[in-house]
């Protein structure tokens, strides 16, 4: 069986699409459509989706099928906290300075990020910004953490999509460049501090109030039309509707920066 027909290849393609923000939270993953797309049986597709479910990337509804997960506020906090522990720990565990091939690869990756940001290629930009952290783990020689970070960065990409992060891609790219520069100097303490602040910045720029309205499509479908809408527009409904209460925050800050450091954008 060709690699492209194996469940792992299908699972990896779905994760890559999430990293590139081509699959949004809640997107339906039809078994038959995927089987037709990859030229495989539905049994192989189900195995691929089951692997992703075990990794927390998709979920299944007995009646409606498979869907990309929609991270909750709690899972959002956990994902960013896990990334902070894993990625700073990874840098702390480095036995010495990264070798020249590893540094060259990281620099090339940052250069690709800059090119994608300049070209306004949203899909490539999103994928590269997330993949930087996987690349760093691979350059550090830890393939196990690279696999874990691939899933974690995909989850945080879903979170950023769902809660509309306003942390600019250019800022993330610049922060990545700073981490690589610190590693090149052999300054692991600075690299660790920059990584911690980078993850805090991404988490802090999520907008809790941007979570999608689950009734948006129904609300739009049932909005007044024709004469009824015209009456509303002319103000024929004389009663003043009660003011809506101030919208409550749905998501508390995911990571609180250390009290001794000034929060920056």
Image: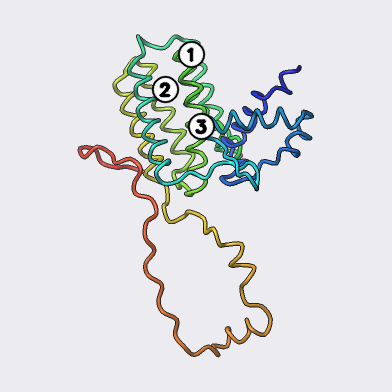
* The label number, if any, that marks residue 226 in the structure image: none
Judge whether 168 appears above or below 176 on screen: below
Q: Position of residue 77 (x, y in %)?
A: 38, 40
Residue depicted at x 62% and y 77%: 224
Q: Residue at the spot x=51%, y=32% of the render? A: 130
Circles 1 and 2 in contact, beta carbons < 8 Å: no
Image quadrant in which you'd find residue 187? top left
Estimate the x, y position of residue 53 in percent, counting from the top left. Answer: 56, 33
Please name which of the two marks, 3 or 2, marks the residue nearer to the observer. 3
SS for callout 3: helix
- Measured along the vertical axis of the image, is residue 74 above or below residue 106? below
Q: Earlier in the sequence, mark 3 or mark 2?
A: 3
Q: State the separation of the CA atoms marked 3 and 2.
A: 15 Å
- What residue did someone put label 2 on? 180
Q: Residues within 10 Å of mark 3 (few under 14, many from 20)?
A: many
Residue holding disc 3: 130
- Would residue 124 appear left or right of 183 to someone viewing this image? right
Q: Going by the image, does 228 lie left or right of 98?
A: right
Compared across the picture, whether 170 is left or right of 112 comes to left
Which badge, 1 or 2, comes first in the chain's sequence? Answer: 1
Secondary structure at numbered mark 2? helix
Q: Earlier in the sequence, mark 1 or mark 3?
A: 1
Q: Quadrant of residue 19?
A: top right
* Residue in the foreground of this view, choosing between 29 and 185: 29
Picture residue at 24% right of the left edge, 37% below the top: 258
Please state which of residues 164 and 168 is positioned toward the viewer in this rendering. 164
Q: Reply above or below: 146 against 75.
A: above
Residue 147, percent from left and from top: 51, 22
Q: Quadrant of residue 193?
A: top left
Image quadrant for the N terminus?
A: top right
- Sort mark 2 into few (<14), some (14-19) or many (20+) by Cα contacts within 10 Å: many
Disc 1 target residue: 102
């Amino acid at each position: 069986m060709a690699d492209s027909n194996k469940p792992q290849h299908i699972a990896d393609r779905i994760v890559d699409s999430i990293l590139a923000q081509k699959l949004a939270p809640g997107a339906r993953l039809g078994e038959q459509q995927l089987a037709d797309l990859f030229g495989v049986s539905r049994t192989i597709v189900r195995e691929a989706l089951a692997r992703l479910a075990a990794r927390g990337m998709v979920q299944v509804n007995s009646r409606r099928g498979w869907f990309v997960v929609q991270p909750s506020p709690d899972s959002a906090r956990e994902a960013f906290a896990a990334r902070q522990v894993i990625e700073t720990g990874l840098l702390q565990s480095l036995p010495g300075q990264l070798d020249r091939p590893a540094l060259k690869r990281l620099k090339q990756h940052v250069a690709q990020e800059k090119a994608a940001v300049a070209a306004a290629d949203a899909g490539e930009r999103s994928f590269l910004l997330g993949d930087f952290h996987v690349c760093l783990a691979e350059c550090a020689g830890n393939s196990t953490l690279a696999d874990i970070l691939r899933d974690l960065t995909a989850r945080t990409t879903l979170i950023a999509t769902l809660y509309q992060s306003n942390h600019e891609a250019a800022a993330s790219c610049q922060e990545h460049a700073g981490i690589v520069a610190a590693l090149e100097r052999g300054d692991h303490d600075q690299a660790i501090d920059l990584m911690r602040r980078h993850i805090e910045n991404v988490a802090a720029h999520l907008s809790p109030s941007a979570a999608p309205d689950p009734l948006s499509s129904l609300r739009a479908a049932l909005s007044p039309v024709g004469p009824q809408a015209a009456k509303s527009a002319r103000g024929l409904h004389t009663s003043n509707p009660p003011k809506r209460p101030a919208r409550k925050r749905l998501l508390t800050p995911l990571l609180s920066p250390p009290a001794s450091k000034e929060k920056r954008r």
